[in-house]
Image (cartoon, helix red, strand yellow):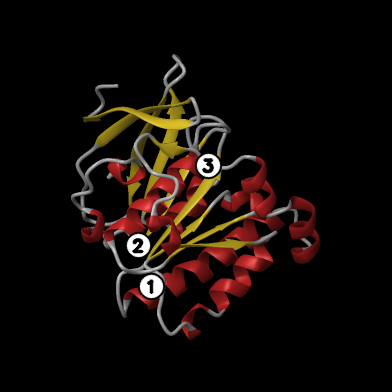
Amino acid sequence: MVDRFFSVLQTDFLSTQSHPILLLSGPPSSGKTSLLFQFAFNSALQSDGKVVFICKRRKLETKPPYLSQGINPSSDIFQRIQMKYVDDEQGINKYFAAFHLFDKFPHTVIMDDFGDLFEDRNCHARYNNSRGRDLAMVRILALCHNAIIHANERGPCKLLLSDTHHGDSPRLLFIYKRWVSSIYTIKGDGSGSFLLKNIYSGNATTERMRTAKYSVALQYIILEGITDGTEY
């Protein structure tokens, strides 16, 4: 449900393991990293497990995420969120290749700007293929998928990815649908706010269609409302 990305009462957070791998995709400067950080906070708040937030250090330090209104930045909950910094897909490969060796799996793994970790020139050279970036993404997605499915055999473990797209939907939607069980997209509403909704659920479990309207202002993520159906 879209409310997982905001500071609202979480009624179904631990009962959504039918979607262990999620994607949040939206245009540049739509608050994706901030929504991921709120998701991380909610996950840490709702469970005793560890939350791992994977991203590029430089990007996070240059443009830190905003919090939702009402969230105390000094809350002890943030101590349960472990930051892991990577520079490219090789860092992701190393982390998930050793995932099965963990004594205890994290409850949630969050990966910011997944697609930005794959540099076209390096991928083309590595695979000697003009679609080297797509091949590299498929390889890492398969590795992540296998790791998360294995972890769920021992307990709840969720993976949330984010990516940037231009237009109405992710450019590589056909790739993501193979490995991701639920996809959320963001689009502008034309008045400065954004609309977040689920566009894909890859199994038989159906979710009530809801749309969240929010804005990014005064260094906060401001939730303007959540509605059923397509009211916005």
Residue under numbered circle 2: 20
Left or right: 88, with 74 as reference point: right
The spot of residue 119 in percent (x, y) is: 73, 53
Which quadrant is home to the C terminus?
Answer: top left
Q: Earlier in the sequence, mark 1 or mark 2?
A: 2
Left or right: 34, with 55 as reference point: left
Q: Residue at x 48, y 41 (%)?
A: 34
Residue under numbered circle 3: 65
Q: CA distance from mark 1 to mark 2?
A: 8 Å
Q: Secondary structure at mark 3?
A: loop
Q: Earlier in the sequence, mark 2 or mark 3?
A: 2
Q: Could you tell me the amino acid type at mark 3?
A: Pro
Dot 1 and dot 3 residues touching (CB under 8 Å): no
Q: Could you tell me the amino acid type at mark 2?
A: Pro
Quarter of the view holding residue 155: bottom left
What crowding class fits label 3: few (fewer than 14 Cα within 10 Å), some (14-19), or many (20 or more)? some
Dot 1 and dot 2 residues touching (CB under 8 Å): yes
**From the viewer's perspective, is residue 165 above or below residue 55?**
above
Most distant residue in the top direction: 191
Which numbered mark, 1 or 3, is in the foreground of this view? 3
Q: Residue at x 38, y 57 (%)?
A: 77
Q: Earlier in the sequence, mark 1 or mark 3?
A: 3
What crowding class fits label 2: few (fewer than 14 Cα within 10 Å), some (14-19), or many (20 or more)? some
Dot 2 and dot 3 residues touching (CB under 8 Å): no
Residue under numbered circle 1: 149
Most distant residue in the front direction: 74
Quarter of the view holding residue 68: top left
